[in-house]
Amino acid sequence: MIRKYILSFAALIGATVAYAADADPVLMTVDGHDVHVSEFEYLYNKNNTQQMQPQSLDEYLGMFVNYKLKVADAIRDGLDRTPEFQAEYESFVKDLSKPYFRDDSVAEALVQQAYAHFADDVLVSHIMMPLTDDGLRTLDSLKVAITAGTTTFEDAARNFSVDRYSASKGGRMGYVVPGRFPWAFEEAAYSIPVGKISDVVNSGMGYHLVRVESRTPAQGEIEAEHILLLTRDMPQSEIEARKAKADSIYKLAKDGADFAELARKFSEDPGSASKGGKLGWFGRGAMVAEFDSAAFALPDGGISKPVKTDFGYHIIHRTAHRGVPALADMRKNIEARIAADERSAMPEEAVMSRLRKAHKAEISQGALDQIRAVIDANDGKCDSTFIERIKIMNPVIASFDGGEISTLDALARTPDTQMSYNPVQAIAGTASLLLDEALIQQEQNRLADENKDFSNLLKEYHDGILLYEVSNRKVWDKASADKEGLEKFFRTNAANYRWDTPKFKSYVIFASSDSTLKAAVAYADSLSTADPTEFVRQMRERFKRDIKIERVVAAKGENPITDHLGFGADRPADSATNKWKFYTAYKGRIIDAPEEAADVRGTVLTDYQSALDKEWLKQLHKKYKVKINNKVFNSLKNSK
């Protein structure tokens, strides 16, 4: 457990900004809770940016007091202590504090590093082995042998590499395309000198030894189109025939025939033939090596002789070239790639590293040795006996200048699947995670105390959740659920709900057939309509999806079906896809004024909620003491 006192997220809820009294004086107290000028001013300014007509401070003061009274009522009711509130609030604190735990300078350095790779074209070879212990040992041995001269890189690649495409070429891969390869592989290719071999690289797809063959200034991108005649898996005689055909097409292109038309007519590349052979823009390494070399060797407008690749014969027409795009044009793509690989965590890790150092955070090697000794004494088992022994010892496994973390805390958070593989390492990993969480929490508390914007936003969200929940309970949901109270309110205020024109009030029963409609009407006659909701429920329960029933209150001209059923208009035409061709009015009649709250439910519900809100506020002003510091408030007004 964390033995020294650390503010929890729950404690943050009641936190106020710890500024000097003269810098951020108390404007008011509501039910004994201080409200500082900074919070009032923050919400006032935010409210006015959202209003068509800005409010004066005097106008806003009354609304603010009402807001704080409702929050005070929610706190008195314990709504800030519910698990639902805690979970939502803690999630918000975590999201809000994320920018404070990210080093933007590290993030920018990663972007600059990735962009710098575009300055060079790097030609590489590699030897690849699977991600196994044997694969790792094999590459370690191969590097020793290549360095000692007992074998060549090329022979090692041919004999051992699992990348058979490059193995057949002595490991030659071609040009590395920045952003197209796993970052660890790309960084190795760009960081080692020409002719040197990297240490073993784990790309996530395999283990690699990487050798840089050449490094030249980047040629940027070219635009090209091509004609492909396929030869894969063909007999030699057919390959020779394809070569002769490619030579003929090449001659036509060189003699001035339209290249795009030739591609549409002869190319067997399904992706580009219909587009006149167009391949768009690409850089070094985007195409297979033979195609790549030929295309980049051409001048703009040049046409290559047939180029043989594993796919077949290509005739390439280079149409244009351009340099490496500016960083501004590539930034979004680079940032997206960074966010998708191991670099994404580096800006946060940099902050955590500083926090660990600043707070003297460390994992206890002594505690890990004790845990290992207990496991060894228990025949390597992490069973109930192991747990009982750890409970007795419970060494401090991690510490920092704000507290300590026990082994039992780490053990409780460590998944069983990890314990079965390497328990000491698993417990150490969990302890490190708990240590980081504690440091983050401590830093969040500091932010809440020292950063005015952060604190005010936390307070706004905290009070906003409470306001929503308490208003739901005491006004919105209460009004919706209180059928008797809603009806009483309607009858008391019936004069406010008059209509200018009569309306047709009815149930409209729709059915999939005439016989079903007749049966539905007959069944409806056996039910009570005193409770409309129950009446509709029973009808739907009996007829399932064979009927649809709606309660309508509509004036003439509002709906073609009610115009027909209630006001004698022609029956509207049915669409061909309409399932509900059979319908009738049930207990329909014309009324001049609403008879019950349900006839004007939307309007009367809003008014009833408003009435409940006014009554609630009246009670709150009697229940809770509000004390405003007029001297501070007048000083605030004078400063505007």
Image (spheres, grey):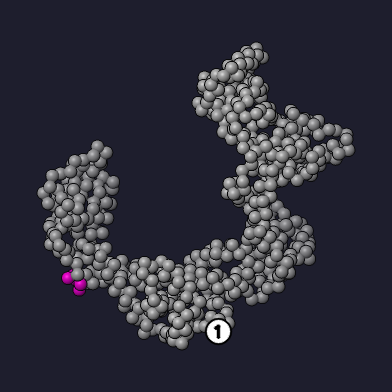
* Horizontal side, residue 281 vs residue 39: left or right: right
Location of residue 140 in the rendering, given as x and y in whole percent from the top left corner: 81, 42
Nearer to us in this view, 476 or 112 = 112
Residue 70 visible in image: no
Residue 500 visible in image: yes
Q: Which residue is mark 1?
A: 22
Q: From the image, which quarter does the N terminus lie in?
A: bottom right
Farthest residue to the left: give it.
568
Amino acid at pointer 1: Asp
Q: Residues within 10 Å of mark 1 (few under 14, many from 20)?
A: few
* Horizontal side, residue 144 vs residue 447: left or right: right
Location of residue 606 in the rendering, given as x and y in whole percent from the top left corner: 29, 67
Residue at (66, 35) in percent of width and height: 284
Residue at (52, 83) in percent of width and height: 25
Q: Quadrant of residue 109?
A: bottom right
Does dot 1 land on a helix, a strand or a loop?
Answer: loop
Location of residue 360 in the rendering, given as x and y in whole percent from the top left corner: 73, 69
* Horizontal side, residue 1 vs residue 148: left or right: left
- Principal SS element in the magenta part? helix
